[in-house]
Amino acid sequence: MDKFKLPPIFRAAGTLCDLEEAELNEQTPELNNAGTGTQKNKTNPMADIYDWAQSIVSAMVIIMLIFTFAARGVQVVGSSMVPTLHEGDRIIVSSLLYTPEYGDIVVLRQSSYRDEPLVKRVIATEGQTVDIDFDLGVVYVDGEALDEDYTNSPTLVQEDFDGPVTVPEGCVFVMGDNRNASTDSRDADIGFVDTRSIIGKVYLRISPLSQFGSVYG
């Protein structure tokens, strides 16, 4: 007995209906997946917290690496850098890609004077000539008077200085901003400072918070 077969017109109609349904599914997938899509768009609070925690930890690691290899915190001792820096100020120092220049405030060690770090300002670098008129309190570098608005007073204390002097290669001449209460390159125990003795340049004051920011005017 032969199987029952639809007349050709019905078979064609059935095929056309199948095609129309398939096209409808392709054009409106969001309708077929409406329930699933709603669930996918839901946020997970724990995932957000995890992402925030991961970001904070990453930032802390980066900061620790910076402080370990590129910068460090130092506390100022003494009054030789008044009015720029005061006793107890905390500053950020870095030696990363640093070459000393005039006006830089630096932290250095000079074992011929003492083991503790010193904070001074670079007045001249290698090859430059320094002279000081102690009657007028004026410092000259290469014959030009420095405009030192950062000092506490004119330079009137001579210490051991007998100028003019030329800074040797690989060295700097440093002075404190509190000129008449600073032991610096004018003193024979400190003298010219080898650049390899410089711990780094001072960039920021971080404490007290009321004075947070750059130490340069």
Image (cartoon, grey):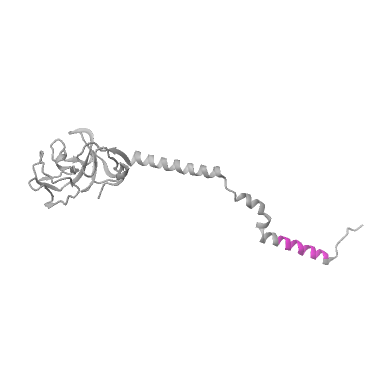
Q: Which residues are magenta?
A: 10-22
In this view, the residue in front, 16 or 209, is 209
Residue at the spot x=46%, y=44% of the render? 55
**How many numbered markers are drawn?**
0
Q: Is residue 58 above or below residue 115?
A: below
Residue at the spot x=66%, y=54% of the render? 34
Q: Which corner quadrant of the image does residue 3 belong to? A: bottom right
Q: Which corner quadrant of the image does residue 5 belong to? A: bottom right
Give the x, y percent position of residue 63. Answer: 38, 42
Give the x, y percent position of residue 45. Answer: 55, 44
Q: Which corner quadrant of the image does residue 70 belong to? A: top left
Give the x, y percent position of residue 156. Answer: 10, 43
30 relative to 81 in the view: left or right: right
Q: Which quadrant does the N terminus fall into?
A: bottom right
88 relative to 68 in the view: left or right: left
Q: Residue furthest left?
A: 135
Q: Residue furthest bottom?
A: 9
Q: Residue furthest front?
A: 210
149 relative to 20 in the view: left or right: left
As for residue 19 lying within the magenta part, the answer is yes
In this view, the residue in front, 105 or 207, is 207
Q: Main secondary structure of the magenta part?
A: helix
In this view, the residue in front, 125 or 72, is 72
Q: Residue furthest right?
A: 1
Q: Is residue 15 above or below residue 145?
A: below
As for residue 151 lying within the magenta part, the answer is no
Residue at the spot x=21%, y=48% of the render? 103
Give the x, y percent position of residue 111. Answer: 20, 33
